[in-house]
Image (cartoon, rainbow, N blue to C red):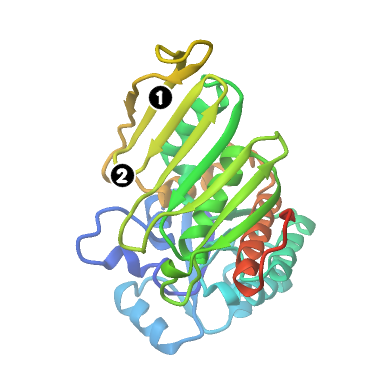
Amino acid sequence: MFKAVLVGLGQVAWRFDDEPGRTVIATHLGAYRAVADSIELAGAFDPSEAARSDFAARHPEVPLFDDIGEMMRACEPEVVSVCSPNDAHRDAVETIFAIRAPRILWCEKPLATSVEDAEAIAELCVRNKTELLVSYVREWHPLWQRFKERMDSGEIGEITCLRVAMPNRLWSIGSHAVSLLRWLGGEITSMRGLPVPALTQHGEPAVSGLFLYSSGASGILQVTSRRNDLVVEAEAIGTEGRLICREGTGSISTEMFAESARFSGYRELSLPAVETIETPSTHSPFIVIAREIADRLEGKSHEEEDGAAAALQVQVLLEQLADTVREPAEPGGAPV
């Protein structure tokens, strides 16, 4: 039996699952409970006495700590979930590694609130051979996995343009969009951001962006709306056609280029064929991540890409997008 601990007892640690009407596990606690045959939740930390008290009232079986170092020494976990506020991630991770380097660090998104802090976390993971997972949950969702599989298959030819659309709030939601742009399209070499002041909400900026991939393809980050109007989709255009992934309908539309009936020597897109991805209503990317962690600990699976490098590139891109709000953008785009 492997052991895990929680650092931070806020919404994504355990409270989301207690929301009225919620049917899908959306917390680290719920995920570990789902893989209890492999991973034991051995302890939890929060600096707030009130937060610890609330947690203890619902989950008295989990030992609680007011000191991260004490928890690490007492529990000796293989896995640590960092669910503390984003700006506290670096301090928490440095305290964790000063006592004991876990085999896997599961960190909430974004990894940090600055490139400097993200670099420090990534460097600790690399130096101690700790695998880093950041909760960009769409990478573990069947719809998005299928979309990437079809993009990578060559079905629509060589990808020339990739667009990801999501609502506002750069750090809370935009981080998911930026992560998707990197995961779906590959290495990003330069970008240019465009602030959208009309969609600023809850103290977070809204920023659209243009990206250039090492493959030569272009990328678009499209801010669609305010937070409650969920337009979440991606569009991949290739030399032979187009794929559109719509999260709201769980579908992927395919339109292939065919000889134009209107213009001699040109091609136009056909009517769409739609693939619906059947996903159980109870599907939880958090549980999928926890199962992946258990498989890695048991040697049944392995890290497919450098998690630290991937998380760091997303952080660099987010910081560059945020910089466009702080200061006017310069022509030519910023190198990544």
Q: Which residue is mark 2?
A: 248
Please give left or right for residue 173 compared with residue 210 in the image. Answer: left
Of 54 and 132, the residue lying toward us: 132
Q: Which residue is mark 1?
A: 254
Q: Is residue 104 visible?
A: no
Q: Is residue 261 above or below residue 225?
A: above
Residue found farthest to the right: 127
Residue 48, image x, y percentages: 46, 87
Residue 182, image x, y percentages: 61, 45
Residue 92, image x, y percentages: 62, 75
Instruction: Give the distance between the C-alpha atoms of the residues marked 2 and 1, in whole angstroms.
Output: 17 Å
- Residue occupying the point 46% across, 66% down: 169
- The image quadrant that residue 20 belongs to is bottom left
- Residue occupying the point 55% across, 46% down: 220
- Residue occupying the point 40% across, 82% down: 51
- The three-letter code of the residue at mark 1 reads Thr
Residue 77, image x, y percentages: 59, 63
Residue found farthest to the front: 263
Of 36 and 152, the residue lying toward us: 152
